[in-house]
Image: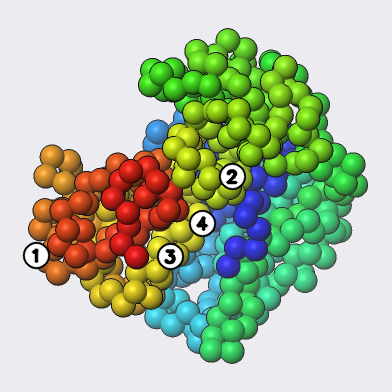
Amino acid sequence: MRIFEADAWHMMTRVIDPARPSVFLDVGANIGKSIDRICEKFPLSTIHAFEPVPDVFAELQRRTAHRPNVRLSETAVGDREGSVEMRVTADRQMSSVLPSSEMGRCYHGAGMQPSTTHRARITRLDDWAAQQNITRVDAIKIDVQGLELAVLRGAERLLRKGGVVAVNCEAQLVPEYEGASTFGEIDAFLRFCGFSLYQIHDVWVHGPEERTTCVDALWLRNEAFARLPREPERLYEIDWRKASRDHPFKRALEGALARYAADGRSPVAIYGAGYHTRTAVEALASPPVRIDCIIDDDPSRQGTTLWNFPIISREQALRRGVLAVILSANSVESLLWDQCATFLREGVEVRRLYPPGRPERHERLNRAIRRARDARLRRLAIFASPEELNEIDRTMLPTGAPVIGALCERDSAAPSNSALESIPLERAAAEGIDGVILCCPFDEPALLARTIPLRHAGVRVFPTYWPPEALAARECLAVPA
């Protein structure tokens, strides 16, 4: 269960500058989902990732082959050098050096049962860093199924003298492995090394009694922590124009402005006057389309200017007649999107710069499916682009969700995600599909228009990202009530 909308990687941008090179260690990398987030938030980072399970490591290699900034090591990490026996479980995410506890088996069932064992090399981070001539590490992420304290003990030199500012670590409250380190032990050791608990981001609850068993937590170095209340957005000085020159934020904003220029949509408003917009300032220097204003929801910013653009409210932007809005806030883009229903109803184009992350996809998709189930529909299909479908797997769907498959059009490639059966769009009604979930963060009206024959056949349609009333206002056929 996610507690904050912003995850640990976003919160680290307050203490680690994304516009400068940085070094991250991902201990227990699995297939690389954390690597994806680090690369998104810290595009100039170098990531050293450790994963000891052979088939998981192979998948990690495949998924990161296009990332030249990622260095992989098929190694376990702990508080000693040598080799260790890995218990490889049916659910590979549960694999551990430690045997499962009775409580762990009770909560996780067959997924925690060992399917095989593997002799893996194990190293200490302090020794590894010395061998690699790495003297500075900015952040360490640890998810090693109960061995977290051993990893930290083997990294004491790095933690004390290696420049580490942040530690993102899984911590068990109820030991799911025999001898597993607990949250209290991890917190005590990190305090001993000069860190303080900053936030708990994810909480896992198991069993019919709904017991909290595990958390993901973020610790910060005390020096950074002490300064954070005075500078909550960031602890480093930025030359915004220098930082912007080749920054991904700038390139994303330039791309959106160029598309609006090609479409002849002007004037444009930028939504967000914070870090993202300031980092992308070079894109605003000579834009290809007229920028009328910057929108921000913070009343203390409204009435001021940013690079001579007035900062105003959403209501004021509508009155000024803007025809397009670009969301400029990578970490809270989903929150800004939720504030844009009025723009969408009024026919103002709203453009996201980034595809949604897994937590947002999961939440919005579940919400749409619940609406369909509340309407007593029994055979649902997801309609999205092949790229979007490839980001959706069965674990993102509610338990027992009646999702039969994914719709594909005759002239488009079928989705490669084998978790969802491919159903031709023109045969959906004949296959008994009674509900369609649209899933496209960028253009659900276009998908809705292509479902007209289905709706004429009585199939219900539910958007994932767009408000139904906004779709109706865009002169697509209204979503059936």
Question: In the rendered structure, which disc, 2 or 3, sits on the residue that comes first in sequence?
Answer: 2
Residue type at mark 3: give it.
Answer: Asn
Left or right of residue 392, residue 47 in this image: right
Query: Mark 4, mark 3: which one is toward the viewer?
Result: 3
Coordinates of residue 171 in the picture (x, y in percent): 67, 67
**How crowded is the residue under tag 2: few (<14 C-alpha within 10 Å), some, or many (20+)?**
some
Q: Which residue does the numbered mark 1 point to in the structure image? A: 430
Q: Which mark is residue 366?
A: 3
Question: In the rendered structure, which disc, 1 or 4, sits on the residue that comes first in sequence?
Answer: 4
Q: Give the SS element for disc 2.
A: helix
Foreground of the two, 398 or 317: 317
Residue type at mark 2: give it.
Answer: Leu
Query: Mark 1, mark 3: which one is toward the viewer?
Result: 1
Question: In the rendered structure, which disc, 2 or 1, sits on the residue that comes first in sequence?
Answer: 2
Question: Splitting the image into 4 quarters, where does residue 393 fall?
Answer: bottom left
Q: Is residue 120 above or below residue 240?
A: below
Q: Which residue does the numbered mark 2 point to in the structure image? A: 336
Coordinates of residue 438 in the picture (x, y in percent): 32, 54
**How crowded is the residue under tag 3: few (<14 C-alpha within 10 Å), some, or many (20+)?**
some
Left or right of residue 473, residue 155 in this image: right
Coordinates of residue 222 in the picture (x, y in percent): 87, 49
Query: Mark 1, mark 4: which one is toward the viewer?
Result: 1
Q: Is residue 16 above or below residue 358?
A: above
Residue 95 in view of the camera: yes
Left or right of residue 86, residue 389 in this image: left
Coordinates of residue 350 in the picture (x, y in percent): 48, 36
Foreground of the two, 154 or 222: 222
